[in-house]
């Protein structure tokens, strides 16, 4: 199986390395619009660089898109035109209108398009999703999700980040409804600037809390922030009528002075990223269903926009029962 990788910055190079380690992948074809970057990354096993997107698409059984966000729609459409399965890093488009149009185009074809929300591929999260779907936890009462960066992002990134809900908490806004399997009917969000005034200057916040209410009555509380002095902390707890389960709580969770806490998302989600590439190749081969379809990412973006609206107005926002079930 030949897999193309469009964009070989930090994320793209990591994906390419994970692809090259899979026995079912015979070749990883690399393309990047920045001159020389693909050639530098082509030192990876089983990889070669090509100078143009057309050459990447020619003969690739699947394509991974890890280029800047504003290029995602055109690259996804190029894959659709050649009937090539694609895994695109989130978001597949920058705003709701553009994403909605692209999702409609995707669903008008039979081409698999996976969105790179890595938590849907994390083995522990996948198992939790299965257990909830199988009824092992019983009726879901409550979900708590924690998401804190170890260090704030570069302040020059903030004006283009989309804000804390689109950038940081978007992962929880995707994963938690996916786990619960019910539509979200109401959102309330609040935020503060506690880490650095640079966030206020970017019209953003650096700490936030989100309350989601689901159609069946369960609630989820999402907490997130841009600085944890001990390390990178991302975990989920689900309380049900039969059992209570925590994912991401281990000896490296940055609590109580942990000496070897997770340093960042590549470290915390290393098993997820490896499994993501394995699942993608299984989808390309027709051995697996798409676990992260494009319409679900449209739901999470709408929820992020509802969070921003709620933060600014101080009022809850009804969400028309957007569902990722």
Image (cartoon, rainbow, N blue to C red):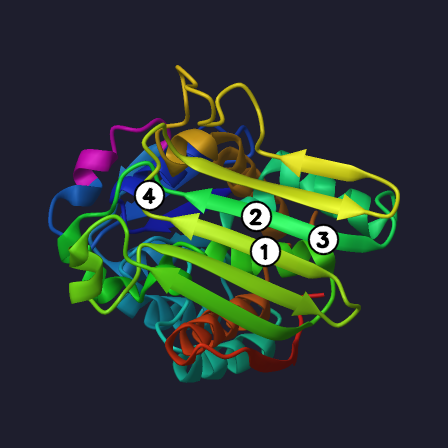
- Say above or below: 237 vs 98: above
Residue 221: give its label.
Answer: 1
Side (left or right) of 268 relative to 39: right
Residue 11: give its label.
Answer: 4
* Residue at disc 3, secondary structure: strand
Residue ID at (49%, 40%):
234
- Say above or below: 266 vs 103: above
- The magenta span reads 39-46
Q: CA distance from mark 1 to mark 4?
A: 29 Å
Between marks 4 and 3 in the image, the one whose residue lies nearer the viewer: 3
Q: Which residue is mark 2?
A: 145
Side (left or right) of 274 relative to 39: right
Nearest to N terminus: mark 2 or mark 4: 4
- Tell me whether circle 3 and circle 2 mark residues in contact (CB < 8 Å): no
Q: CA distance from mark 2 to mark 4?
A: 24 Å
Q: CA distance from mark 1 to mark 2?
A: 6 Å
Q: Which residue is mark 3?
A: 142
- Tell me whether circle 1 and circle 2 mark residues in contact (CB < 8 Å): yes
- Tell me whether circle 2 and circle 4 mark residues in contact (CB < 8 Å): no
- Tell me whether circle 1 and circle 3 mark residues in contact (CB < 8 Å): yes
Between marks 1 and 4 in the image, the one whose residue lies nearer the viewer: 1
* Residue at disc 1, secondary structure: strand
Nearest to N terminus: mark 1 or mark 2: 2
């Amino acid at each position: 199986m030949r897999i193309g990788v469009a964009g070989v910055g930090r994320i793209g190079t990591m994906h390419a390395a994970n692809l090259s380690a899979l026995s079912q992948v015979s070749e990883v074809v690399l393309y990047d619009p920045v001159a020389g970057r693909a050639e530098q990354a082509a030192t990876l096993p089983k990889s070669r660089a090509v100078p143009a997107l057309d050459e990447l698409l020619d003969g690739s059984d699947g394509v991974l898109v890890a280029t800047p966000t504003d290029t995602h729609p055109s690259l996804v459409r190029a894959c659709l035109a050649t009937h090539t399965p694609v895994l695109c890093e989130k978001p597949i488009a920058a705003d709701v209108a553009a994403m909605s149009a692209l999702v409609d185009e995707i669903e008008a074809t039979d081409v698999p398009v996976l969105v790179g929300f890595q938590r849907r591929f994390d083995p522990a999260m996948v198992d939790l999703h299965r257990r909830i779907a199988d009824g092992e936890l019983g009726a879901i009462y409550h979900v708590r999700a924690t998401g804190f960066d170890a260090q704030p992002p570069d302040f020059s990134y903030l004006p283009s980040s989309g804000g804390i809900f689109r950038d940081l908490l978007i992962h929880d806004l995707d994963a938690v409804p996916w786990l619960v399997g019910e539509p979200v009917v109401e959102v309330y969000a609040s935020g503060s600037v506690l880490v650095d005034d640079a966030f206020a200057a970017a019209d953003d916040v650096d700490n936030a809390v989100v309350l989601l209410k689901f159609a069946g009555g369960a609630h989820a509380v999402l907490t997130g922030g841009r600085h944890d002095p001990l390390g990178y902390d991302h975990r989920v707890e689900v309380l049900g009528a039969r059992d209570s389960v925590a994912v991401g709580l281990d000896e490296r969770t940055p609590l109580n002075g942990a000496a070897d806490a997770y340093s960042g998302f590549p470290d915390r989600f290393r098993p997820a990223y490896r499994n993501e590439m394995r699942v993608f190749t299984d989808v390309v081969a027709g051995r697996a269903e798409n676990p992260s379809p494009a319409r679900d990412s449209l739901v999470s973006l709408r929820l992020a926009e509802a969070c921003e609206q709620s933060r600014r107005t101080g009022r809850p926002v009804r969400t028309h029962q957007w569902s990722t079930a």
